Image: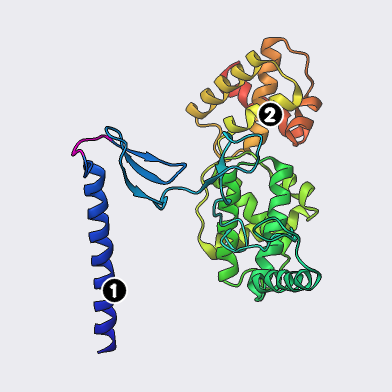
Amino acid sequence: MLRLNLFGAIAMSFERDFSRLMRLQKALDRCPRCGSGPMVVDTNGGELVCGGCGFVVKEKIVETGPAWRSFSKEEKDDRSRGGAPTSIAMHDMGLATVIGGINKDASGKSLSASMKATVERLRTWDSRSQVHESTDRNLRQAFSELDRLSDKLAVSDAVVEKAAYVYRKALERGLVRGRSISAIIAASLYAACRDRETPRTLKDLAVVSNVKKKDIARCYRLLLKEMDIKMPVVDPTKCISRIASRAGLAEKTKRRALEILKKAEQARISAGKDPMGLAAAALYVSCTLEGEDKTQRDVAEAAGVTEVTIRNRYKGLRSALSI
């Protein structure tokens, strides 16, 4: 009986809103005084005005669109959206509210001493309530580390969102318990880079995260195994631009290396090879063909691989492609 009454109240409320909307729609169609139009909405005054006779049809209209506001008196035309967008890379997904640090009321007057103490106490409890559970504290620490790593590695927002998604799933399955948060978040970021085809190596993650490469690799294999993640095969051509910019190579050398990698893929000699080493070897071959003075050591340091790897891949490319 209670459920039927509740449904009836909801239906009546919906019917009232719908009838109010239909009346407003009719008011938007034509002017009730002159019967013509067009109807003009004054966004500054919140009024619906007839464009023909100037009759105010409706006043104090509630704006149902996006919330826009100006934060500067000097830049009234430079309006920005009020509030940050939601993101899973925040521990509360950006949905929590924050009590501001300005001790002034709505009219701009300063608060009294007793009210300042009360508001400060409210701020303290508001910040504590957002991280009441252990899961929230874990996510806050992890995503703070993720924000720091993403800044140092200069990855896109899509990679950061994917890393946050992987870490949240790992936390739900209990994979973080008993392991380092820094290692798991670094492994999640590496998995996101692999998924989005962003050329970042385990060595890069180890340098910026202060976690051993072996520990990140172990956590990465754990994520792949327990969460059944399928990673795409890394394309060596994605690594060409990064190595070329670090080594200071010319554009024609980079384009020649891309052609060499394309021929190697067609000849099916790139399967099973380290993409970074193969890209570095293709660049070194391109340097010898274009006459650019770069040694194997220069290319190896730019790629983060050894000279032996470049030498072996170099020999394989020249013999297979008859260069």
Q: Which residues are magenta?
A: 34-38
Crowd class of label 1 (few under 14; some 14 to 19; many from 20; radius 10 Å): few
Instruction: Give the x, y percent position of residue 169.
Output: 55, 64
Specify whether residue 36 is painted magenta.
Answer: yes
Identity of the amino acid at label 2? Ala
Main SS category, magenta section: loop
Q: Amino acid at mark 1?
A: Ile
Q: Which numbered disc covers residue 10? A: 1
Residue under numbered circle 2: 280
Please name whichever residue, 204 or 65, is drawn nearer the observer in this view of the structure: 65
What residue occupies the far top of the structure in this picture?
291
Residue 63, percent from left and from top: 42, 50
Q: Give the vertical position of 91 relative to 71 (above or below).
A: below
Question: Dot 2 lies on which element?
Answer: helix
Please tell me in which quadrant of the rendered image residue 246 appears.
top right
Q: How is the image coloured?
A: rainbow
Between circles 1 and 2, the one closer to the viewer is 1
Residue displayed at 68% across by 61% down: 105
Q: CA distance from mark 1 to mark 2?
A: 66 Å
Residue 68 position, x and y percent, is 52, 45
Residue in the picture at 67% in, 12% down: 289
Place residue 19 in its image quadrant: bottom left
**Residue 127 visible (yes or no):** yes
User: Looking at the image, which is closer to me, 130 or 44?
Assistant: 44
Q: Can you give x and y, in whole percent of width and height, for residue 180 in the image?
A: 73, 65
Comes first in the chain, label 1 or label 2? 1
